[in-house]
Amino acid sequence: MGQMQPLTVTALDSAGKPVANLPISVSIFGPNARELSMTTDSQGVAHSAYAGANAGRDIISANAMISGEHQYSNQLEVPWAIPAPPPASPPSSESGSEPPSVEIVSPQGDGILTGPIAVSAKITGEGITSWSATLTPAGGNAITLGTGSGTPPATLGTIEPSKLGGGTYTLSVTAATTGGSATETETLTIGTTPGLPPPPPRTSGGGAPTIRSVTPANGAVIGVTTTVSVEATPPEGGSIKGGKCSFSQSREEK
């Protein structure tokens, strides 16, 4: 389909001799219907061609006036088919066209982690564009251990159980190239040092501040106007957003 189909018509008289300079009409019926005109040469032969734009079968016949009589040719059937699609291109071999592979080397999820341990992974692939290592507690939010671009370092981050609550965590290491990304996960159990209570979950600026009364002293008898002052220390990693002072009177029972 879409290619030229050649047509050849030969005109002979009743004696079988070629008829030169004979006008011939060619009728095409089918999905590529049309009319063609041609004229025979000195050998009684006429040539033409047409292109089929639609799939299907065309029926072709020719007719002409020879010796005052209308003469018709035999019918020709021309099939037209949709061409097969071109073969798929082979995979590109350009740098970074394939996703990388990721294999966590350390730590392995075959024990309880109680001390600091480095996170490392075997990351292979050309043209690494980015990488990351995260630790996610069950039912909690991911904690980023390390992230960067380009070739990953030998140590991607460090897990410090003393700053985490005990329980089950998911370690995820991800790397990407221009051809895609890959992630490897490992389930870890984080415990505590034997003999010590489990540390509280790490929070961002949580806990209560420490307050110490300065004036008046505890138990002082006040008979004049006195300034009230305190020392307030915010919790680690937090801040004091506001405060208030209240006074209440107590009576001794007799």
Image (cartoon, rainbow, N blue to C red):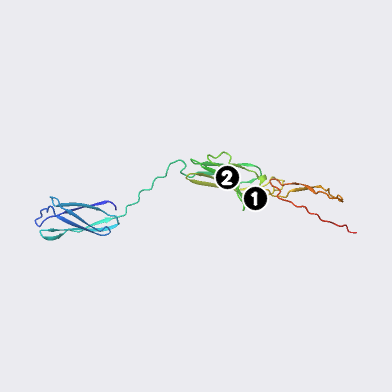
Q: Nearer the viewer, residue 187 or 178?
A: 178
Query: Toward which corner of the image does residue 75 lie, by quadrant?
Result: bottom left
24 relative to 108 in the view: left or right? left
* Quarter in which the C terminus is drawn: bottom right
Residue 152: horizontal and vertical position, in percent?
55, 40
- Write down the residue under mark 2: 133
* Nearest-to-viewer mark from 1 and 2: 2
Marked residue nearer the N-terminal end (1 or 2): 2
- CA gap between label 1 and label 2 equals 19 Å
Residue 124: horizontal and vertical position, in percent?
51, 41
230 relative to 143 in the view: left or right? right
Mark linked to residue 167 = 1
In percent of the image, x 53 and y 47: which residue is there? 183
Three-letter amino acid code of the residue under disc 1: Gly
Tag 1: Cα neighbours inside 10 Å, few (<14), some, or many (≥20)? some
Residue 220: horizontal and vertical position, in percent?
86, 49
Q: State the SS at label 2.
A: strand
Three-letter amino acid code of the residue under disc 2: Ala
Query: Which residue sits furthest left?
Result: 15
Mark linked to residue 38 = none
Q: State the SS at label 1.
A: strand
Q: Nearer the viewer, residue 213 or 2?
A: 213
Q: How many marks?
A: 2
